[in-house]
Amino acid sequence: MKVRTAFLLLLLVVLVSTGYYLLIYIPKHSKAGEPVLALMNYFLTYAPMQPIGEAAYVLPDSLEVWDTPAEIRMQVATLKSGDQVYALARFRQWTHVRLLNGHGGWVDADGLMAEATHAEDEQLLSDMRDLPVQATGHASDLTHVHIQPSRKAAVVAQVKSNQELAIFGRRVVERPQESITLGVPSISSNIREAWYLVRAGSRVGWILGRLVQLDIPKSISAYTQELNLVAWLVLNTVDDNGHQVPQYLVADRVGTETYDYSHIRVLTWWKKKQTYAVAYREGNLQGSFPILVTHEGNVPSFRLRLVDDKGAKYQKVYALFDTVTRVMGTVDGWQSDAMPERPASKLRKVRRRSHGSSQR
């Protein structure tokens, strides 16, 4: 009887010790992929790693590299945004990487961007290289920049609160409405949300529009009253006692969320009163970014990408002569950079400023 009791106690001790070793000690001290029980072919292992085998790029401003994913670990390096590593394998929320110097380590998997996503973002950056900035602003909160205007799209950058952003485009997309009550199907309807195409540091991508605050220049901030000013582009500059003052084309979004803007104004500098005046305005537009500005000698021109009531895309081209804006004509489609073929005698004269050019 005593022998049996002693055997049961010994068996209990062995079970408890084995359980502690498997459930507590190993998760804290073993590295991913190490064997737990040395059975045939390591049949039972501790969290085997998932192989990756491709290049990856660092997303945040800094990313720590550790010697192990265990709780007791030591930092061995720090990477910065854009650094390239070679991702060897994935283990839970960790990625085993090889650095450019040949050393290995472990990093937070969320801090890496896949090679394919990086290539796609590089192509987007190349496509945007010649596009003008439509507006500038800053992020209102810590958020992600996505490769596509979608919450589920791959992340290509992380921006901090108040980080400066250059805005190049805008797109409105539909997002399925989530169920409010668990287990009860939601009403079949979609909600629409706007996204901005931005450059954040050296990366480009899409960020939710509600997380972007526009930084309108103080010199034209007075022209935001009763109008939702969404873009401003410098047409040219004029000399005012040795100072070069910019003249602007500004775009407003009034009465629409689908289109990027519905109204434009040309702001020219009135030297006598040291203020801007609205030299031209036009509404009832269905416009999309980008607005393009070019120059022929000293004459600035700009072209709008518009949609007519039948859904056809076209461009409308304007030129600024001193303080007079003239419509030069239209071009079919959005891709052509040709100038309109319109006789000069049929150019539509537009309204002048009431104070006239002699008062500048």
Image (tube, grey):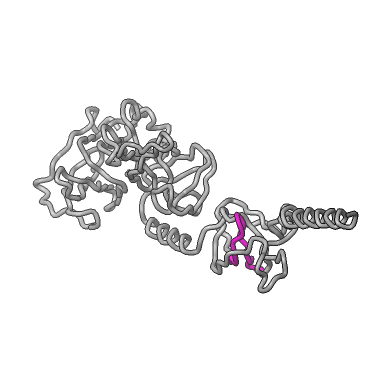
**Near-viewer residue (201 or 8):** 8
Left or right of residue 279: residue 52: right
**Near-viewer residue (216 or 240):** 216
- Residues rendered magenta in the picture: 86-101
**Near-viewer residue (135 or 187):** 187
Quadrant location, the C terminus:
top left
Spot occupied by residue 356 in the image (x, y as percentages of width and height) = 23, 31
Quadrant location, the N terminus:
bottom right
Reply yes or no: does residue 100 show up in magenta. yes
Reply yes or no: does residue 255 show up in magenta. no
Residue 247 in view, yes or no: no
Spot occupied by residue 201 in the image (x, y as percentages of width and height) = 51, 50
Left or right of residue 331: residue 209: right
Residue 161 in view, yes or no: yes
Q: Quadrant of residue 341?
A: bottom left
Q: What's the residue at 16%, 48% (across, down)?
A: 329
Q: What's the residue at 83%, 55% (across, down)?
A: 8
Q: Can you say whether 197 is above or below 67 in the image?
A: above
Query: Which residue is at the far right?
Result: 2
Q: What's the residue at 61%, 59% (across, down)?
A: 91
Query: Which residue is at the far front?
Result: 1
Spot occupied by residue 241 in the image (x, y as percentages of width and height) = 40, 36
- For the stretch drawn in magenta, the main secondary structure is strand
Q: Can you say whether 41 is above or below 90 in the image?
A: below
